[in-house]
Amino acid sequence: MTHETTLIATIAVGFGLAFLFGYVAQRFTLPPLVGYLVAGVLVGPFTPGFVADAGLASQLAEIGVILLMFGVGLHFSVGDLMAVRRVAVPGALAHMLFSALLGMLLPRLWGWTWAESIVFGVALSIASTVVLMRALEQRGVLDTADGRMALGWLIVEDLATVLVLVVLPAFGTSVHPDSATTHAAGASLPITLAITVGKAVAFLVLMFVVGRRLVPWLLERTARTGSRELFTLATLAVALGIAVGASALFGVSFALGAFFAGVVINESDLSHQAAADALPFQDAFAVLFFVSVGMLFDPLAIFQHPLPILEVLALILIAKPLITLPIVLWFRLPLRTALTLAASLGQIGEFSFILAALALALGLMRREGQSFIVAGALLSIPLNQLLFGLVEPVDRWVHARPRLLAMLERPRSEPDVAAPASENLPGDHVVLVGHGRVGSAIAETLARHGIPYAVVERDWRIVSTLRENGVTAMFGDAARPGILSQAHLDRARLLIVTTPDPFQTRQVLTLARQLNPAIDTVVRTHGAVEQIYLERVGVGRAVHGERELAASMARYALDALAQSSASAS
């Protein structure tokens, strides 16, 4: 094959096999990422047949990293992070620290250097946001309190990883001073880190002082032209231009530059359009990144180093979740939240690959170490589904043993806010479980019609705000005994459950029937099977969100078409 067609062949074969195996993975309810990695293994130098150009694949993968980090920046929400900051920030940092320390022990036992062991441990401590979101969406719990907590936790890990990517080149320079290009050979690690962090801070100041104004202004001016092509081009030019400029002028990684390019655009009113325009390119080049990672994996490593790979897998699937449980329970959160977070962190993904690739280039990781990481991802991502499947049975098993539950769960000691006395509820009131996007809209309707109601909510900030506004609100999980009784469900007329978590909904209904067998109920569900089950057990109304939305839109369409037909005749 001639040199002129090598790039085309690499892209064509990479995309083709990635699509094929990604489709197969999707059919088996696995993240397509698994298929992309397998495609990379097949076109890599360690398997027979076509071998893609590793150099070209690496450069295409670098574009994928830039656009991937740009997308992370575009979707970074300070509000989501602040909502769970009390637990997510210290919890995620503690989890990364303990996981990294445990991960360091394995390569030390294998005879690796301290520098290699540190980087390897950090790479294993990072979970994949992409894999997590997929798992939460499949179970319909992305919008629940547990889902938001898990996402906030992963956001903190992502930010910590960005910081690691900043200091890793300086760490590599200190470990291998002969390879230093920007610093004097033999410079001490504190000095090298200080210089690197100083440059990164200078870049951040420039981005938030100048870029925060200049980039949105540029996109706004481009949007006024009305040209979709120019706006897409401007978005890509900003992402790639800032990433390359940050690396050339400030010595920071492409990933960091792209991330903060996305952050400054995120504050603009045009961020959603920018994200929509960049998404196809991000997806395409991110696929090539995962393919290039798979190319570095030698399948024979499974047979040559079976014990190290099993040890890595045990650390990911067993040790990391076990580290998570006591950390979450320390913050006095429910056991179910702790179990959900533990399952969420039992995998590794894209950031581990990015860190491993950079470490390999800096001489801070052995090639077999990267193979171990890829093998750990390939095996842990499918098995992570099993961890999520254990959340409900384990939670149910523990709740059937009150003494064990009392040892694990401790009531939160929140500062009290004067709450409207629930005894003043007139009876025949409404008990509303959940005050999120759906629950708050229902509460507004009830208040507008003068219907008395009480709210049961697990988020203390929401409870505090409601109480300050004179609303009867109870803090706690309605699926736990004793919480609904505080809202005097025994003399309520209607129970509304807005949580999308089917397991929690079933528990709430069971407790509600014990307190008030005649209570009328309306619940929210995201699945047709769950809707049928709920209606079969006597729920007054099970609202299937997507079906109700479709029905409402269809009614409007029929009305609009009927009006058009009438005017035409």
Image (spheres, rainbow, N blue to C red):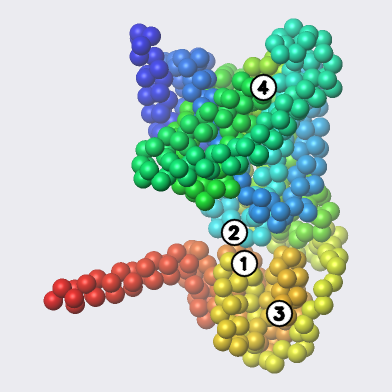
Answer with mark 3 or mark 4, whichever residue precedes in sequence. Answer: 4
- 171 left or right of 232 in image: right
Numbered tag placed on residue 251 in the rendering: 4
Circle nearer the N terminus (2, 1): 2
CB within 8 Å, label 2 to label 4: no
Residue 87 vertical position relative to residue 458 in the rendered view, above or below: above
Q: Is residue 535 above or below residue 423?
A: above
What amino acid does circle 4 point to?
Answer: Gly
Helix, strand or loop at label 3? It is: loop
Q: Mark 2 and mark 4: span between their CA atoms?
A: 39 Å
Q: Earlier in the sequence, mark 4 or mark 1?
A: 4
Pair 2/4: label in front: 4
Q: Amino acid at mark 3?
A: Val
**Mark 2: amino acid:** Asp
Mark 2 highlights which residue?
A: 143
Q: CA distance from mark 3 to mark 4?
A: 54 Å
**Horizontal and vertical percent for residue 413?**
86, 65
Q: CA distance from mark 2 to mark 1?
A: 9 Å
